[in-house]
Amino acid sequence: YPSFPEYVRIGQMILLADGTVVLSVTNVRRNQIDCQVVSGATFSSQKNLCLPGVKMDLAFLSDADIRDIKFGVDQNIDIIFASFIRTPENVLEIRKILDATANGKHVKIISKIDNMEGVNNIRTIIDVSDGIMIARGVLGMDIPLDRLPIAQKNISSLCNLSGKPIICATQMLESMITNIRPTRAEATDVENAVMDGADCVMLSGETAIGNHPVEAVKNLHILCLAAEKTNRTRRLYENIKESMNLMEKSQAIAMAAVSISYKIRSDIIIALTTTGKYKIMLINLAPSMP
């Protein structure tokens, strides 16, 4: 980004690698930025960079991004996880490219919320997206730390009420990159995310570069199952049901299936579907049983 120095001021903080490295700008030149390390750490290549609170005037999709999208469609991908979504127009720009391809109309778009502008526009972004991911690592660099848990809960609730899948990501079991067991705080974080309505909790470094990837997945599985068995998920279903305006016949059938399953204390719901439509409707109602 040749114009990057134009957005930087002396004294400004630059965050790297989800904020594990903090730099303070000491001098800005035409094509160079000098910084002092405020908080250092060891990190690998291809890590993220953030200027907190700064909106950079960059094109949302580069030529390389467009080529990558078209290449993915040619490989029969099912989903695009789109980073740096700030407005609903960003999502529609991707959708326009997908719709212009031969096989792209079926491809789903999961919008990653990783900046303040995306949080502020979350309702309209949800409307045009097939699902939402809360990218807590990058988002936590762009908004105050005390606002991150509130944003996570609000976004989860809005997605639940809209019937859109919500994914909670980043540092779910971060300590298991090196440790064989998660911390108590991580266990609480995972179960709270599920009870707040998350449809998916995602591991990244734990399985990509961690020393105990299988144990991380097993622990995450145990925590999710425990959270799904609580009464909180039943209350979540009731809230979703009350918020829905009736409705297509298929939605009514899905709602009846979940309601009956609770009444007879069913252990499982089996959906016979060729397109996956009923399965998605059932999942969106957040039943506690698989």
Image (cartoon, rainbow, N blue to C red):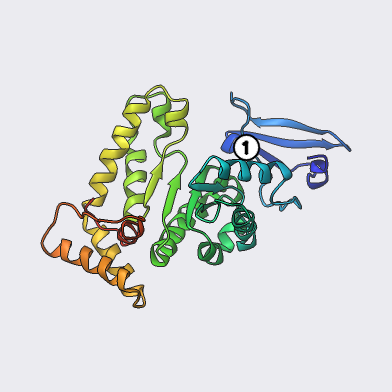
Instruction: Tell me: residue 44, above or below residue 73.
Output: above
249 in relation to 79, above or below: below
Res 187 → quadrant: top left
Residue at x 62% of width, y 54% of height: 94
Which is nearer the eye, 61 or 103? 103
* Mark 1 crowd level (few <14, some 14–19, many ≥20, 10 Å Cα): few
Q: Nearer the viewer, residue 128 or 159?
A: 128
Dot 1 lies on which element? Answer: loop
State the residue lying farthest toward the bottom: 246
Left or right of 128 on screen, residue 181: left
Left or right for 10, reference 256: right
Q: Residue at x 21, y 51 (%)?
A: 229
Task: Give the total number of marks visible in the rendering.
Answer: 1
Q: Which residue is mark 1?
A: 48
Q: Using the image, determine if residue 193 lies above or below residue 125.
A: above
Q: Is residue 34 left or right of residue 140?
A: right
In the displayed orientation, state which residue is furthest to the right. Answer: 30
Toward which corner of the image does residue 239 lie, by quadrant? bottom left
The quarter of the displayed image where residue 105 is located: bottom right
User: Residue 202 at what x, y percent from top left?
Assistant: 42, 41
Q: Position of residue 197 (x, y in %)?
A: 35, 56
**Residue 70 seen by the camera:** yes
Q: Position of residue 66 (x, y in %)?
A: 67, 46
Type of amino acid under label 1: Asn
Look at 54% across and 63% down and name the residue there: 128
Q: Is residue 277 left or right of residue 141?
A: left
Quadrant location of the N terminus?
top right
Which one is nearer the viewer's eye here, 187 or 198? 198
Q: Nearer the viewer, residue 19 or 163?
A: 163
One can see residue 50 in this view: no
Return the x and y of residue 122 as percentages of the image width and height. Answer: 54, 62
